[in-house]
């Protein structure tokens, strides 16, 4: 279900209310609701808008790979974790083309499930497909979300700003953070590079939150023919690897790789 509740004005921070096809704050700053349903809450001309997340080609490659089952095990695990906590209001931060947001919304039909991403291309794709969730163009570093309104925050492979999460997640609410585990896509790296390295663990300052659970999830994914290029294009290596190496691996018949996720569950302090 589309919801425009609990949004704030990116210009002045006041709560937004709906009037017809637009959202307004107390000072009459106005944001139009697109005909498909999403709202753009990144100020036009702002530095963040000009440097705005992943591009359309990356998103389309991501969408095609998702449709081949890439994230199925991860989405199931996130849905399972959410079941143990209050989940009326769920926010997927840096949601990309919306696969995880859509799966959460499918599992929790009565919840208000929202995805936010800085990339307009990503939100256009997400909004068009996942009609049981709501989507905004928004910056995780300065979320256009009302304070203490979110029961469950989710962030999968995207930058996290704990100060903002501390502001928007309800006391006692949770935040699920997914990072690549050391062996994630190791087989792809071994094909691309002579010397491979394991992913490093992210160390974060999570003020206002306590780590209450941690899971390692392992899976495998096989890409054949043209699917390999899509798989490569949704990794950071695609843009930092010599073209010849990308072309060599893209021309292979089949690539099977490990997917390995580090899933952390944080609880927002009650005090
Ligand atoms: C690797 S993709 C992950 C997308 C999605 N969570 C998934 O796992 O499929 C990273 C996403 O973070 C978004 N992103 C990067 N910086 C952001 C920011 N400051 N605010 C919101 N989204 C951001 C990008 O646009 C991109 O969609
Ligand atoms: Zn305003």
Image: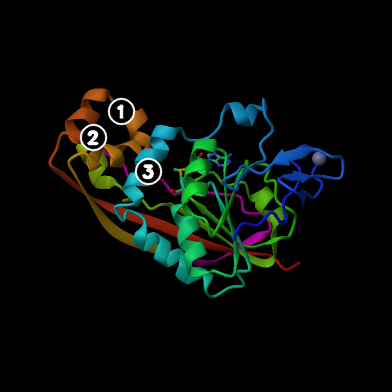
- Is residue 202 visible in the rendered image? The answer is no
The residue sitting at the right extreme is: 27
Identify the disc placed on residue 192.
2
Which of labels 3 and 1 is toward the front? Answer: 3
Q: Residue 209's spot in the image, x, y percent?
A: 64, 60
Which residue position holds label 3?
62
Label 2 neighbour load within 10 Å: few <14, some 14-19, many 20+:
many
**Mark-to-mark CA distance, 1 and 2:** 8 Å
For label 1, the SS is loop
Span colored in magenta: 192-215
Which residue position holds label 1?
241
Dot 2 and dot 3 residues touching (CB under 8 Å): no
Mark 3 CB in 8 Å range of ligand 1? yes
Q: Main secondary structure of the magenta part?
A: loop
Which of labels 2 and 3 is toward the front? Answer: 3
Give the left or right position of residue 162, taking residue 125 as reference. right
Q: Point out the image quarter for the N terminus.
A: bottom right
Dot 1 and dot 2 residues touching (CB under 8 Å): yes
Identify the disc placed on residue 271.
none
Label 3 neighbour load within 10 Å: few <14, some 14-19, many 20+:
many
Sequence-wise, the earlier of marks 2 and 3 is 3
Give the left or right position of residue 265, taking residue 239 as reference. right
Mark 1 CB in 8 Å range of ligand 1? no
Residues 196 and 40: in front is 40
Give the left or right position of residue 227, taking residue 173 as reference. left
For label 3, the SS is helix
The residue positioned 71% from the left and 57% from the top of the image is 5
* As drawn, 62 above or below 169: above
């Amino acid at each position: 279900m589309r919801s425009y509740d609990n949004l704030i004005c990116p210009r002045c921070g006041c709560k937004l209310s709906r009037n017809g096809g637009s959202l307004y704050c107390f000072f009459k700053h106005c944001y139009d609701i697109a005909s498909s349903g999403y709202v753009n809450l990144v100020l036009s001309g702002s530095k963040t808008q000009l440097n705005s997340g992943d591009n359309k080609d990356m998103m389309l490659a991501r969408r095609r790979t998702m449709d081949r089952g890439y994230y199925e095990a991860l989405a199931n695990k996130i849905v399972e974790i959410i079941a143990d906590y209050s989940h009326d209001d769920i926010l997927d931060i840096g949601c990309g083309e919306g696969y995880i947001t859509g799966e959460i919304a499918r599992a929790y039909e009565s919840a208000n499930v929202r995805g936010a991403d800085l990339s307009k291309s990503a939100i256009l794709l997400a909004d068009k497909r996942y009609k049981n969730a709501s989507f905004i163009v928004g910056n995780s570093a300065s979320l256009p979300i009302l304070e203490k309104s979110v029961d469950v925050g989710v962030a999968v492979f995207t930058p996290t700003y704990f100060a903002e999460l501390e502001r928007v997640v309800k006391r006692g609410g949770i935040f699920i953070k997914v990072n690549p585990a050391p062996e994630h896509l190791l087989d792809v790296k071994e094909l691309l590079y002579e010397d491979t390295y394991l992913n490093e663990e992210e160390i974060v300052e999570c003020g206002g939150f306590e780590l209450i659970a941690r899971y390692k999830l392992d899976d495998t994914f096989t890409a054949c023919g043209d699917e390999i290029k899509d798989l490569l294009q949704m990794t950071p290596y695609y843009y930092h690897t010599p073209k010849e190496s990308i072309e060599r691996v893209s021309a292979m018949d089949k690539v099977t790789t490990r997917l390995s996720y580090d899933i952390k569950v944080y609880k927002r302090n009650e005090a």
